[in-house]
Amino acid sequence: MAMMKTRIIHVNLLLLDANVIIDLHTLGLWDQVTKKYSVYVGSIVIHWEAYTYPDKAGQYQPIDLISQIGNTIQEVSATPQEISAVKSKFSSAFFDLHEGELESMAILLNMENVVFCTTDEAPIKAIFLLDKIDCLISEESMLKKAGLSCNKLESKGSEERFKTYIKIGQLMKMLGQGLT
């Protein structure tokens, strides 16, 4: 397998997955990230996926993204046809792609200068298979580029785990797996 080149990602617009939004709230970094980046969030994530996070005591607190639309975040969406078109590109190996991830991928394919941040394996591999790897960033790298501490970040958001998923996607592509 060929070595992966070092990627240089310039973040203009940041599209966040639900898991990253929840992590940022849990870590107390949400406000700092929304000040450092132009943050975009898919409609499905806003309305159906990112609604609570565990605080330090383990109690679930609400996430109110709706009141932040137009202020600290921008809502973006894809049509059902665009989401369906993305879903149809993948074999049954990607049944674990959530609707919010599918919408984010449709947005990613139709919007320029946007970088998607997720910690989930399936969309990372899927985006690699779609040849959009330069539009993807790990949670750790996103925080570092913003000058924010990521020493409490769970391993799922690490650059190391991200690179592992990229390597799996690279192998899948070489073997002709994943796409229809």
Image (cartoon, rainbow, N blue to C red):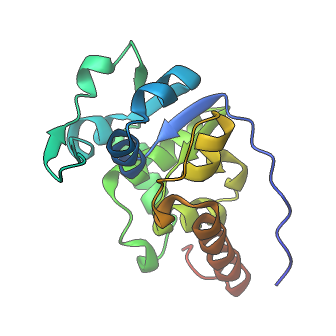
Q: Residue furthest top?
A: 71
**Where residue 13 appears, x then y in whole percent?**
60, 29
Residue 97 visible, this orientation: yes
Q: Position of residue 7 (x, y in %)?
A: 80, 53
Taking the spot 25% from the left edge, 47% from the top edge, the residue there is: 49
**Image quadrant in which the C terminus is located:** bottom right
**Residue in the image at 55% along x and 48% along y:** 150
- Residue 26 placement: quadrant: top left
Does residue 109 appear in this view? Answer: no
Q: Residue 137, position in %: x, y?
A: 63, 49
Drawn side of residue 72 relative to residue 166, left or right = left
Vertical side of 152 occupied by 79: above or below:
above
Q: Residue placed farthest to the left in the image?
A: 59
Where does the image place residue 17, in percent across and percent down from the top left?
42, 46
Of residue 106 and residue 72, the one placed in the foreground of this image is: 72
Q: Residue at x 25, y 18 (%)?
A: 67
Q: At 69% across and 82% down in the image, what residue appears?
A: 171
